Image: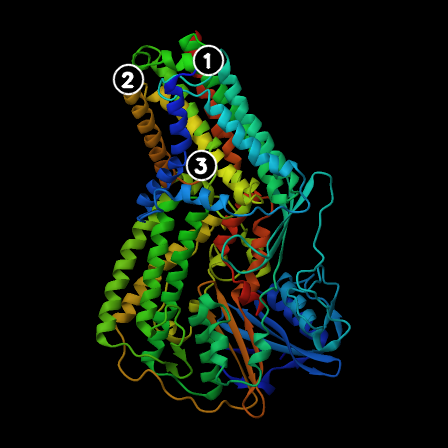
Amino acid sequence: MVAPSGLISLALALALAPMMPSIINRTKALFAGRHGQPWLQPYRELWKLLHKGAVYSHTTTPVFFTGPIVGCAAMLVGLLFVPLAGTHPLISFPGDFLLVAYLLGLARFFTVSAALDTGSSFEGMGASREVFFSALAEPALLLALATLAALSGQLSLADIFARIDAGVLASGAGPALLLAAAAMMVVFLAENARIPVDDPNTHLELTMIHEVMVLDHSGPDLAAIQYAACLKMWILGSLLVSVLLPVRSGWLLADLGAGILGLGLLAVATGVVESVMARLRLVRVPQFLIAASILSIVALVLVVR
Amino acid sequence: MQALSVYNGQALAASEIPVVAADQFRSELVRSVADGGRIAALFADRREGTRHRIQAVVAFDAESVLRLTAAWIDAQYPSLTPDCSQAHWFEREMWERHGIVPVGHPFLKPIRFLPHAANGKPSAPRAVCGTADFFRMEGEEIHEVAVGPVHAGIIEPGHFRFQCHGETVYHLEISLGYQHRGVQRALVGGPDRRTIHYIETLAGDTSIAHASAYCRALESLAGTRIPPRAQVIRGIAQELERVANHIGDLGALAGDVGYLPTMSYCGRIRGDVLNMTAVLCGNRFGRGLVRPGGVAFDLDQDSVDELKRRVRAAAKDAKVAVELLWDSPSVMGRFDRTGAVSRETCERIGLVGVAARACGVARDVRRDFPYGIYRFAQLPISTCDSGDVFARAMVRWLEVQRSLAFVEEQLAALPPGPVLRPIGALRPGHAVVTLAEGWRGEICHVAATDDAGRFEHYQVIDPSLHNWFGLALALRNQQISDFPLCNKSFNLSYCGHDL
């Protein structure tokens, strides 16, 4: 059964995902006293990259171009399972939240392999950091999702978020929900390579985590990577917004509108975080991520006690 | 008498410089440095057959004197570096340029890539640009990271080799020389119409300080004094250059840790300060302002009032933008204890300028060897003692405030009179050492004239030559991801080093 609302929310995700980095960028520009780039700049860049040729080093193997392809494909598949603001996603089965978490892992595995395939010391360093930090971010995300599953008594993302509405947030389970949301916010920042974990704007290879792994990709490959990054932000953002802004009116337009407004606010919040704080020292990042896991654990304990 | 004491900018007959035996030269230099002297310059200036004359300028900060010694040495001599670390870079340079071999030097390799072996001597290194032997660590878990010479940002070329264990840097080797232009050789036979332009581009962001050091050398060799009004304008220009660069650096430091507000505002304020220099002479970097005999542009009353207004506005804006840094725990978490250099290391390798003052060493040419307007108007020295990125940022901020106050004070008390006085011919057979405090640190120019009053030798020591090694040491046992931050906190010149 294909729910029409699922098709609509999928189409919105595919079309609007590049707006999130755009909103972040404009927020940062506002703080810095600049005009910022045009609203549609991310689309223009994707368009530009798609029309360019790709350059491949002769030291790379086919592993190198599986990175962008698998990365983008994994995000597209993941999107099929993710409900935005209570709308029913296209596919849903009990336990699909594990699949989504590991689709992110699959994308990472291939991105990291492609980075290692270049044989560059920078990309090796970036890959090592990415794997280390995501190993710490993954438990935080899974435990937060487990909290939601335990709270709603359901095992598919669609059912979990159908049960979590404003009433739950206001009830005794509210604190647990907020703790889980806080953990998911940390994961959102870390997985999307934002400050305070990573700096998406730096040109300094030695300090990068995510960006350094994709330095050797160009043209359509880079477009796939950038688009996948937008989709990833949309997926993780949808999960977070579904918890924090649980509008479940039953009216498709109102629900989707609330969901998209929530994602916009999340992008603004990310821009504000990036504008008011510096990036963490790399050795402090694990502590930050472990703190997120601890929040998730506390949330889970509160729910199952 | 083994060494001659002179003051900053005091011309003397070249024959007065005592020439001693090679072993005396060595013991004199080692003893001077042990007594608190600092090698400001060490270079070879003459050649006779296989023998070279090498000359040392040792600066005694506390006494405000420079001690000059020279010696004739053969193609080989026992290296000074094992007994005097400050000689390290200078000996490598002499070997590279003249093929003089310091026997027993612990790490003898060229510091640049000179296309021709010096004077065709077999003992000189023959370099191919970009090819060099690098220090390597062995071990299964050790990995080597090579950065540059082509960088991601728009910066000068330089190559950095890190020997890392995981994220920790054990050793950093800095390999420069991609910017070698042969400026010092081109200056010989001058001064001519091109000389001042060479000088103003020795390090493009230090045009005013280098040009002042050069012009003072010329004026001293010609025996002329410049009008007081010109002295003051030079002082104002030098301080504006310092302020603009320091503010730019503070903004860039904020940018390197991803802290946007200070980065954005400092970028703008730096532009405001550069525009003040443009009010002085029409060029934002002060090119064309400082000329032998004074300055090429006078200030009218309208410009003075305009500058006063802008100085006050810049001081106010900078205070808001920079103090955000000290109030942000996330920024302080990155600055504190990152890239620390101990005071002992600083003294031993002879750091200068901001990097030295950040180690708690009160070393500033403007006070130690006062020249020009600084003989009459003193600036307090700004120091900080932790030696880390925070200290280098804080020293910059203190200097920004003090320099702006100085500029405002000087603008209010501009003496009347002309600003340019023609200088006569240079006295033949004379030599002079001029020191100046550029925004990075001590600039040392050594000029010597031949029998016709032309430059027989012209040596330039940019502060970067002293400080690059300090950056390499600051990185030991640091996180490799903190390198860009440490590098920016020193912000050294590549072309000033390579010359």
Tell me the subunit letter for badge 1: A
Along the viewing direction, whichever of B453 and A197 lies nearer the viewer: A197
Which callout, 2 or 3, points at the residue further toward the start of the chain?
3
Mark 3 and mark 1: span between their CA atoms? 28 Å
Mark 1 element type:
loop
User: Horizontal placement of B453 versus A272: left or right?
Assistant: right
Quarter of the image for residue B380 reads bottom left
- Give coordinates of residue B37: x percent, y percent: 57, 67
Rendered view: B263 above or below B468: above
- Give coordinates of residue B427: x percent, y percent: 51, 90
Task: Report which residue position mark 2 lands on.
Answer: A251
Q: Amino acid at mark 2?
A: Trp
Mark 2 element type:
loop
Tell me the subunit letter for badge 3: A
- Give coordinates of residue A181: x percent, y percent: 39, 22
Task: Report which residue position mark 1 lands on.
Answer: A156
Which callout, 2 or 1, points at the residue further toward the start of the chain?
1
Q: Which mark is residue B240?
A: none
Quarter that holds the N terminus of chain B: bottom right
Mark 2 and mark 1: span between their CA atoms? 22 Å
Task: Report which residue position mark 3 lands on.
Answer: A194
The reply to the same-chain question for discs 2 and 1 is yes
Q: Is residue B273 visible?
A: yes
Mark 3 element type:
loop
The reply to the same-chain question for discs 2 and 3 is yes
Which callout, 3 or 1, points at the residue further toward the start of the chain?
1
How many labels, in total? 3
Tell me the subunit letter for badge 2: A
Q: Amino acid at mark 1?
A: Ser
Rendered view: A238 above or below A113: above
In the image, which is nearer the foreground, mark 2 or mark 1?
2
